[in-house]
Amino acid sequence: MDIKLMNITKKFKSVDNIFIKSLDTINLDINYGNYLSFVGPSGSGKSTLLKILTSNMTPNSGDVFWGKYRLSNTSQKEIAYMRRTKFGIIFQDNQFLNELSVEDNILLPLAISSYPVGQKHKYYNTLMESLNITSLKKRHPFELSGGEKKKVSIARSLINSPEILVADEPTANLDEASAREVFNIFSNLNKLGLTIVIATHDERFGKYCKETYYLSEGKIVSFKGNS
């Protein structure tokens, strides 16, 4: 599925009732199979952009297209279904349920979507083995290191076999070795055909991505493509 953003603007009201632009006239095409990153400092609009392209936030103006679907003309029920089935999302703060085991946290999206867990059992085992986290499945999130938590987040985001992986600051607070491991995981997933979209302040992602967009004050100020 391709994603298209047309003239996207997002404003937030400050405590002084002044509207502040978080995104200013963003135009972007994200083609199937791409691997791109939005790079910029805190407050540049990266996270807002991810929320809008996944329809977790509505722009003040402009249009978002998921394939042939113009989201402003699509029902919330249909959007919610497509988000569950087409997207895998890695949140900046992981958003685990600490009372559940690692295994149950990873399988939770299947329960939410009423998908028969048994049909994914083989895929689940392969996923755990490929990320080298099989030994963690009976632990709880609070028992994991930062790098382990991130790999569990990646597994959870992939359990529904999405077309598009969206990650907000996936290497935040990770050491160099753990960050490099995340880079390599994403690169391998992209080689398998997964579309990957990342928001990060970590410019090291640039050499792994096919396209890098640099944001400042809600605008795309420069672009770099890797052949």
Image (cartoon, rainbow, N blue to C red):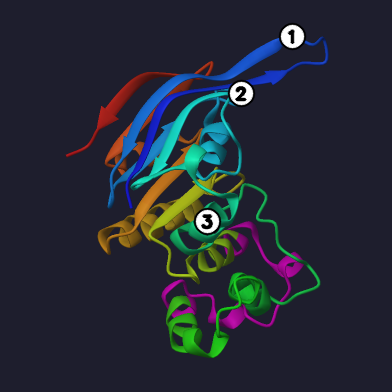
Q: Considering only order in the chain, which callout, 1 or 3, is on the residue closer to the N terminus?
A: 1
Marks 3 and 1, how far apart in space?
A: 34 Å
Q: Considering only order in the chain, which callout, 1 or 2, is on the residue closer to the N terminus?
A: 1
The answer to whether residue 212 of the structure is visible from this angle is yes
What's the residue at 66%, 72% (across, down)?
105
Amino acid at pointer 1: Ile
* Residue 219 coordinates in the image, percent (x, y): 46, 18
Position of residue 93 relative to residue 23, above or below, is below
Say if mark 3 contacts mark 1, CB within 8 Å.
no
Name the residue that disc number 1 marks: 18
* Residue 48 coordinates in the image, percent (x, y): 58, 32
Say if mark 2 contacts mark 1, CB within 8 Å.
no
Image disc number at residue 43 = 2
Callout 3: SS: helix
Say if mark 2 contacts mark 3, CB within 8 Å.
no
Amino acid at pointer 3: Glu
Q: Which residues are magenta?
A: 128-149
Name the residue that disc number 3 marks: 78
Marks 2 and 3, how far apart in space?
A: 31 Å
Marks 2 and 1, how far apart in space?
A: 16 Å
The answer to if 192 sits in the magenta stretch is: no
Q: Residue furthest left?
A: 227
